[in-house]
Image (tube, helix red, strand yellow):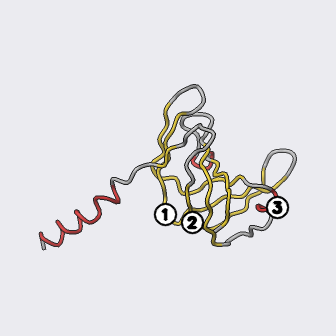
Amino acid sequence: MRLVSLLLLLLTQPVLAADCFQIVNSPSPPQIVLRGVIELRRDPGPPAGIETFLKLSTPVCVQGVARGGRPFKKERVDLIQLGAPVSLLSSFRTLDRVTVRGELWGPGENGGPPDGFIFAVKEVL
């Protein structure tokens, strides 16, 4: 029994030690692939509209530097707002399963809500 427990611990160790996605402010940030389910929400502010979110199939860790130079790290981000051309976003429907490639843009302030992250979609795979 101890051997099985030890093996399980060793096998899960790389998952527990996974690196965070780094939000990079550069002209060519790294491209990231995310998978999940589309969730549409009404935008509460004027003018009324719809915001598109990706409910991730597996939570991710995101870190970077917020405005003002303060570092931030979110361990279990499972919902990210999508940013993309209107022509692309309008094709998404609630509960669509998608795989998207793009780049992460971070929250403006340290400690913002997880859905304060923007994922700029470059391509739907």
Q: Which label was assigned to residue 87?
A: 3
Q: Residue at x 49, y 32 (%)?
A: 71
- Left or right of residue 112: residue 71: left
Q: Examine the image and state in which quarter residue 11 appears.
A: bottom left
Kindly check if marks 2 and 3 are in contact, taking CB atoms under 8 A apart as contact: no
Q: Nearer the viewer, mark 1 or mark 2?
A: 2
Q: Secondary structure at mark 2?
A: strand
Kindly check if marks 1 and 2 are in contact, taking CB atoms under 8 A apart as contact: yes
Q: How many marks on residues?
A: 3
- Marks 1 and 2, how far apart at CA: 8 Å
- Left or right of residue 40: residue 4: left
Q: Examine the image and state in which quarter residue 53 appears.
A: bottom right
Neighbour tally class for label 3: few under 14, some 14-19, many 20 plus, Cα within 10 Å = few
Quadrant for the C terminus, please. bottom right
Q: Which residue is mark 1?
A: 58
- Marks 2 and 3, how far apart at CA: 20 Å
Q: Position of residue 58 (x, y in %)?
A: 49, 63
Q: Residue at x 73, y 58 (%)?
A: 41
Q: Examine the image and state in which quarter residue 111 appears.
A: top right
Q: Residue at x 74, y 70 (%)?
A: 93
117 vs 111: above or below: below
> Tag 1 or tag 3, which sits nearer the N-term?
1
Q: Secondary structure at mark 1?
A: strand
Kind of residue indicated by mark 1: Thr
Neighbour tally class for label 1: few under 14, some 14-19, many 20 plus, Cα within 10 Å = few
> Tag 2 or tag 1, which sits nearer the N-term?
2
- Left or right of residue 120: residue 29: left
Q: Position of residue 51 (x, y in %)?
A: 75, 55
Q: Which residue is mark 2?
A: 35
The answer to which of 34 and 16 lies nearer the viewer is 34
